[in-house]
């Protein structure tokens, strides 16, 4: 793998789900992750419960009111068999609980689903997502969030996602 490339992504786990609900999107993506052996049977129920208790929606309107919002759903490492960051481009915005204010929902257009089999690395991956978002700036984010081809999404992330500190 060349310098500047990130091994958290794989072309076979970039998703464009058809569902228009949070639960539907998570079910659709989780079913495929399970079929690929990347997660366990307990992944989906625990992911749904964790999102209910600790939502992961990120409101980007504070950066730029024209930017779409994203979420970073994840669950405990015991339900994951391989560490990966799974990009999910939604067909239309879906209401999602706001990470900073769980009583509030934001319309989310993209997910960075974190699959992490190492609990120690969980916050590091989320920090890298935030570094990626912050590093692109408003125009870079608009360019990224406008991509709708899985190969283009994977290539963009593989080349531009921040490397691991370790």
Image: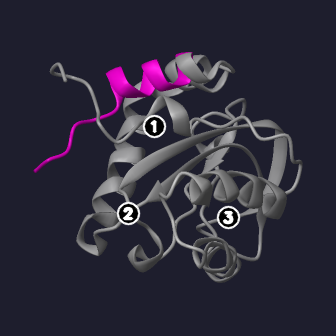
The furthest residue to the left: 166
Quadrant of the rendering where the N terminus is positioned: top left
Could you tell me what secondary structure mostly forms the magenta stretch? helix
Pointer 2 residue: 116
Q: Is residue 60 magenta?
A: no
Pointer 1 local density, CA inside 10 Å: few below 14, some 14–19, many at least 20: some
Residue at 67% across, 81% down: 49
Q: Earlier in the sequence, mark 1 or mark 2?
A: 2
Pointer 2 local density, CA inside 10 Å: few below 14, some 14–19, many at least 20: many
Residue 95 vertical position relative to residue 80 in the rendered view, above or below: above
**In this orientation, which residue lies closer to the viewer: 112 or 27?**
27
Give the magenta range: 152-166
Q: Cβ–Cβ below 8 Å for labels 1 and 3?
A: no
Q: Earlier in the sequence, mark 1 or mark 3?
A: 3
Residue 108 coordinates in the image, percent (x, y):
73, 47
Residue at 14% across, 47% down: 165
Residue 8 vertical position relative to residue 122 in the rendered view, above or below: above
Pointer 1 residue: 133
In the image: residue 124, left or right of residue 164? right
Mark 2, mark 3: which one is toward the viewer?
2
Mark sitting on residue 98: 3
Residue 58 coordinates in the image, percent (x, y):
60, 54
């Amino acid at each position: 793998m060349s310098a500047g490339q990130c091994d958290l992504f794989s072309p076979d786990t970039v998703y464009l789900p058809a569902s228009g609900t949070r639960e539907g999107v998570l079910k659709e993506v989780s079913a495929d992750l399970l079929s690929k052996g990347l997660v366990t049977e307990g992944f989906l129920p625990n992911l749904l419960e964790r999102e209910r208790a600790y939502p992961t929606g990120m409101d980007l309107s504070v950066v730029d009111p024209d930017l779409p919002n994203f979420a970073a759903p994840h669950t405990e490492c015991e339900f994951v068999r391989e560490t990966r960051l799974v990009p999910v481009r939604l067909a239309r915005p879906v209401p999602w609980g706001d990470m900073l204010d769980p009583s509030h929902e934001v319309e989310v257009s993209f997910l960075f689903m974190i699959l992490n089999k190492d609990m120690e690395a969980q916050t590091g991956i989320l920090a890298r997502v935030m570094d990626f978002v912050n590093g692109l700036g408003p125009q870079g984010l608009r360019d990224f969030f406008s991509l709708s081809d899985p190969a283009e999404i994977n290539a963009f992330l593989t080349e531009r996602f921040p490397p691991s500190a370790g």
